[in-house]
Image (spheres, coloured by chain):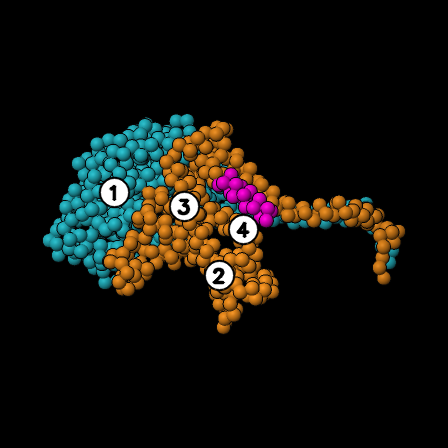
Amino acid sequence: MSARVNRRQFLKTTAGAAAGLSGLAAVRAPAFAQKRELTFLSWNHFVPASDDELRQQAEEFGKQAGVTVRVDTIAHLQLPAKRAAEVQARSGHDLVHMTADDPFLYEKALVDVGDVVDELGKKYGGWYPFSKEVALTPSGWRAVPWFWISFPATYNMTHFRKARLETPKTWDELLKHGTVLKKQGNPVGIPISHCADANTTFWSVLWCYGGKVLEADGKTPAINSDKTAQVVEWYKELFKDAMEPEVLSWDDASNNRFILSGKGSWIHNPISPYNTALAKKMPIADDINHHNSPAGPAGTHSAPPIQTVGIWNFSKNVDLAKEFLRFHFGKENFDKWIVASNAFNHPPLRNLADHPVWANNPKFVMLPKEAEFAHPRGWPAKPNAAVRLIDVNYVLPDMVAKAIAGMPIKRAIAWAEDQIKLAVQGRLETKGKV
Amino acid sequence: MAVGPRAIEAAGFPGLGRFARVREWWEQEHVFGYGLILPALLLIVCLVAYPFSMAIYFSLSDYWVGSPGTFIGLQNFRDILGNEIFHQTVYNSFVFTSIAVVFKTVLGLWLAMLLFRTLRFKRLIRGAVLLPWVIPTALSTLAWWWMFDSLYSVVNWTAIRLGIVAPPGPNWLGVTGYAMSAVIAVNVWRGLPFFAVIVLAGLVSIPREYYEAAEVDGASSWGRFRHVTLPLLKPVLAVVILFSTIFTFADFNIVQVLTRGGPVNTTHLFATLAYQQGLVGGNLGQGAAISLFLFPMLAAVVFIQLRYIRKD
C-alpha cells in the first residue's frame, strides 16, 4: 500500500480531531462550571465521630447550595506544614482549621470574616473574651473562633475521700492536699517535660500568680519577676512533696495513664481520660471527676487549646465559605456536632455553651465556665511568633526543671529570659502585627 | 526483514531520516556516556543539590513558614552560636555519637565473629540478627519508649524482680544521664546489625590459608585475631565506622520518639533541634542554619576517614 501521508494531510486530520475534541469539551465545560467545589482542611479529630458529623453537614450544605463540599482531614501534627505549603503556593483549600496564633501569623493570607463574627455574636449572646484575643488582629477578624478544649482538673474521688479532702480551689491548696495524698500513696501529677501539657499548665499557674512571659507590647520579656520566682518555688515544692520524679519524662498521654492506672489522684488535663475510661468500660470511670482549674492570688486563668477557622484570601469561594460557616454555626447543626464529639468541642459562643451535654452531666457541668478565664498563650501580649518559639522550645517547663535539678531559681529565670530574648529577636517581623 | 533508515526514507517518511541522524549523534561515545549519567545527575540535582542550596538560602534569610524573608547575612548563625540550647546540642551530639559508635564497633565485631562460626541454623540466626535494622525505626523506637515508660517500664519491672535495683527504679527518660544512656542504647541496638553484617562480609573474604599459616606458627586465638583478622578487616572497619558516624550524628527518629530532646534539652541532636525550631516553630531560617552545622562536621569526618583508608 502506498499510503503516502504528507504533512498537509496529517495536519488536516489532526486539526479536525482536535476541533472535534474541543467541541466535546465545549459541550461539557458548563457542566463542570456548575459543579463548584468548596473545600475544608482540618485535623483528624481526637473524637472521630466529630469529623463524621462535620462531613455529614458538609454534604447537606452541598445539596442545599448545589455545590460539592469536601472536608479533608490530616494528622494534627501535619497541619502546620500543610497550611504553610498552601500559603506558599497560594492555592489549596478554601476553609482552613487554625490553631492559637495562626490568624496572626497568616494575617496577610486570610480574608476578613468580621461580618460572620458579628452576626454570630449577636445571634448567640456574644463571644467569650478569648475569642477576640485569638482571632481579632490589628487588621480585623482573620478567623472565626470555632471551638476550644477545656483544660480542667481531673481527680480521683475515692483517693480524695480517703484523705478526707475537698477538691483544691487554689494552686496553694493543691500543694497542701497533694502532700497528704502523696503520703497516702496517691501523688498528683503535672508534667515538667517536653510536652504540650507542660506548657499549658505553666502558663495557667503563672497567670494565676500574676506573672507574665511578655509585656503587652509582645516584645519586652517580662518573665524576670518575683511572681515567676514564686511560681517556680511552688513547682519545686509540689515536685518534692506531692509528685513523683516521673513527671520529668512525661508526654501528653502520660498523665492520662497516671490517673487511669489508679495510682494518681489529680491531674490538669482535658476530659480525655474520663472519656477513655467510659469508652473502654474501665471501672475507674466511676471514681474520676472534674473540677475547675484552680485559682491563684491574681484570680483564675487558663491556657486551653483554642481552635479557629479561616478563609484563604486566594480562595475563589469566599462567600460560599462564609455561607458554610453560617450553616455549621446554626444551632441545630452546632449542637449535633458537640454531641458527636462527646462534650469535647466547646463552643466559643455563650448561648451555644448552654447545652444539656454539659448541663445534665454532673461531671461536666463546670466545664463551660472555664471559657471565662481562658486566654491564648502570650497573654497579655497578642499571640505572635515569639510566643510560638517559646512554646515549641519548652522554655518554661525547662526553666522549672532546671530549678528542680538544683539550679538557683534566679539563674533558672535568667536562663529563660535569655531564651525569650532570642525568641523575640528571631520572631517574624510583621508591621503592626504584634 | 530488517528495514534500514534509508529504505524508510525512500518509502516517503522524511521524519525517520532525522531519527537516524539523532541516533547517529546519540551513539557517539561522549554523548552516550553523558546521557547515561544524566538521570542520576538529575536526581542528585533535584533531591540533593536543590534542597541543599535552598537550605543555604534559608539560613541566610529571616525566612518564616509562609512568609518569605529578607537576606540577613550570618545573623541566624550568630544567634544560634549565642544560644545555650545549641551549645548543649553540640555537646550532646558528640557524646551520643562517640559512645554509640564505640559500642557499635566493639559489639559489632564481636557479633560478626560469633556469626562467622559454624552454627546450627546459621542462616536463620544471621537473618534474625538483621531484624532491628530492618524494622522501621519509628516503630521499634515506640516499643523501646514503652519499655522505658515511667509508669509501666518493663526494664524496671524486670530489674526490680531480679533484685538488681530498688523500686521504683531509674526514671529512664526524665534524668539526664539515664535519658542519654537510653537513646544511646537504642541507637546501638539498631545500628549493631549493620556493623555485624558488613564486618561478617569482611571476615568471609579473609583467605583461610593465613589462619592455617598462623596456626602452624603457633599463634593463639588472640594472636590470630590481633595479627590476621584485625589488619585485614581494617579497610572494611574504616568504611563501616565512617558510615555509622554519619548516620549516628544525623539521627532523628530515636530522640524524637523517646525524649523530644528532653530532659531540659540534654538529648537534643542537630536534627531534632532543627526540626523543633524550623518546622514546628516556623522559623525556617534558623532551622536551616542549625542543620547546616552538621555539614562541616560530617565533611571533616569523611575527609579524615577517607585519607586514612587511602593511606592504607
The amino acid pointed to by label 2 is Trp
Residue holding disc 4: B238
Lower position in the chain sequence, tag 2 or tag 4 = 2
Task: Identify the element where label 3 is drawn.
Answer: helix
Q: Nearer the viewer, mark 2 or mark 4?
A: 2
**Residue B58 percent coordinates (x, y):** 50, 35
Labels 1 and 4 in the same subunit: no
The amino acid beneath tag 4 is Ala
Viewer-side residue, A108 vs A286: A286
User: Reading the chain from its start, which is encountered first: label 4 or label 3?
Assistant: 3
How many angstroms separate mark 1 from mark 4 (CA)?
44 Å
Residue B169 % position (x, y): 27, 56
Compare residues A408 and B42 and report the one nearer the observer.
Answer: A408
Q: Are marks 3 and 2 on the same chain?
A: yes
Q: In the rendered view, does A170 fall on the left or right side of B163?
A: left
Judged by depth in the image, the label closer to the viewer, 3 or 1, is 3
